Image (spheres, rainbow, N blue to C red):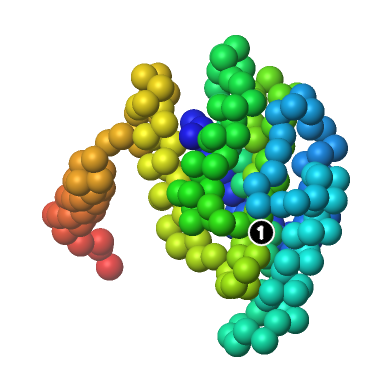
Amino acid sequence: MARVFVLVEDEAGRQTGRGGSFAGVLSYVLRDAGPEAWRGTFGLMLPIVDAATEMEHAHRTTHLDGNRRGPKTKRPVLHAVLAWHPSDLEWLTREHLADTVQSALAAMGLSEHQCVWVTHTDTGRPHVHVVANLVHPDTGKVARLGLIKKRMSAFCASYEQGLGDVRCKRRLTPKAANENRSRQARAGQASVGAADKQKASNLPAPRP
């Protein structure tokens, strides 16, 4: 459970977290990785250096080349980041990070999917790159990520509450309060617009 969840941009620059190359993403993730102990895998038999091959094999054999019906995806890679505050580096452990990734995968509906997680500390702000296979290794079905940003925002809010150190209080604001604020803002803008129109109607007509 991290403080911040971010979907990494895809090849087109959109923040979807979706990609088509396990090898490309993992090469980037492992390039500037932090402590070697602060990384791991879930649902994989081979070591991290061979993870891309195993994940691509699952995508190809259970999803593309299988007998399953339905559309086929060419973007089975999910690349997301879980980030913490710099001060959290003092108490973070491998076990905590591993549990965090597992919890995040469950929140995304990917608890049964293949995943590689790698921690980076080079920026001073500890963060974990999560690279998951959206294709289920047994069924070949692609996971659905509907409302993933909202779900993971709630996930992070719950974590900070459990930690007793809330740094993003806005996430804890009830939805109704946010909606009321939006209505008030819209009402205020409408009032200003109506007042401007009234002023304009009171002006003398221009002389011919």
Depth check, front residue: 96 or 10: 96
For label 1, count other residues whose C-alpha is less than 10 Å away and answer few (under 14), some (14-19) or many (20+): many
Depth check, front residue: 44 or 173: 44
- In the image, is residue 35 above or below residue 177? above
Q: Residue at x 40, y 22 (%)?
A: 163
Q: Where does the image place residue 88, in percent across and percent down from the top left? A: 56, 18
Q: Residue at x 56, y 27 (%)?
A: 96
Q: Is 99 displayed left or right of 126 in the figure?
A: left
Number of numbered discs on residues: 1
Q: Which residue is mark 1?
A: 133
- In the image, is residue 167 above or below residue 196? above
- Residue 18 visible here: no
Q: Where does the image place residue 166, in percent across and percent down from the top left? A: 38, 23
- In the image, is residue 107 above or below residue 91? below
Q: Secondary structure at mark 1?
A: strand
Q: Where does the image place residue 32, in percent across and percent down from the top left? A: 82, 33
- Name the residue type under label 1: Asn
Q: Residue at x 37, y 34 (%)?
A: 158
- Residue 169 visible here: yes
Q: Where does the image place residue 109, in percent across and percent down from the top left? A: 49, 56
Q: Classify the position of the C terminus by image quarter.
A: bottom left
Q: Residue at x 83, y 59 (%)?
A: 53
Depth check, front residue: 109 or 204: 109
- In the image, is residue 134 above or below residue 164? below
Q: Is 191 displayed left or right of 51 in the figure?
A: left
